Amino acid sequence: MNIKGQALYAEMQSLASQARGVGTELKLQHTEQVNPSQSDFGSMLTNALGHVNNLAQETSKMRTAVEMGDPGVSLAQVMIASQKSSLAFEATVQVRNKLVEAYKDIMSMPV
């Protein structure tokens, strides 16, 4: 396998700039969709969980496509999608842990 260092570095830089662009697009879409005065915490939490679930399902579909030999999906795309899904899930677990901790603190307060 012949790997050109400069070409690999250029490709990594290109992928990094694309990832930054996707993050910016998601942030803009998120700020347009959610108006704190019009939505409650429950609906925001439901939307966030739905988004995490969609990421996991999309990653699963991409993984299956690569396993079946689909030339339209590369291994790099699957790995990036897998990492995004994993990070989203870990963030969700951390939010859940903080909510449980806050609930326990409130319940243990004397009235």
Image (tube, rainbow, N blue to C red):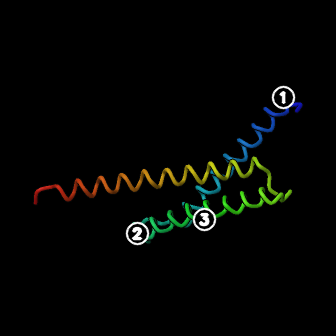
Q: Nearer the viewer, mark 3 or mark 1?
A: 3
- 82 with respect to 108 (left or right): right
- Structural distance between the alpha carbons of marks 2 and 3: 18 Å
Measure the alpha-carbon separation of dots 3 and 1: 36 Å
The residue identified by callout 3 is: 54
- Residue 109 lies in quadrant: bottom left
Q: Earlier in the sequence, mark 2 or mark 3?
A: 2
Dot 2: within a 10 Å radius of its alpha carbon, few (fewer than 14), some, or many (20 or more) residues? few
Seen as rendered, the residue at the extreme top is: 5
The residue sitting at 80% across, 60% down in the picture is 68
Q: Residue at x 65, y 56 (%)?
A: 25
Which residue type carries mark 2?
Gly
Is label 2 in a helix, a strand or a loop? helix
In the image, taking residue 46 as reference, residue 32 lies left or right, namely right
The nearer-to-camera label among 2 and 3 is 3
Amino acid type, label 1: Gln
Question: What is the crowding at mark 1: few (fewer than 14 residues within 10 Å), some, or many (at least 20)?
Answer: few
- Looking at the image, which residue sits at the far left? 111
Q: Which residue is mark 2?
A: 42
Secondary element under disc 3, as helix, strand or loop, is helix
Which of disc 2 and disc 1 is earlier in sequence?
1
The 10 Å Cα crowd at callout 3, few under 14, some 14 to 19, many 20 or more, is: few
Work out whether residue 14 or residue 97 is closer to the camera in this orientation and state it: 97
Is residue 2 found left or right of 68 in the rendered image? right
- Residue 58: give x, y in percent of width and height: 67, 62
Residue 74 picture location, percent across and down: 80, 51
The label on residue 6 is 1
| Occupied quadrant, residue 85 | bottom right
Q: Nearer the viewer, residue 76 or 45?
A: 76
Task: Tell me residue 78's x, y (percent).
Answer: 72, 52
For residue 38, the mark is: none
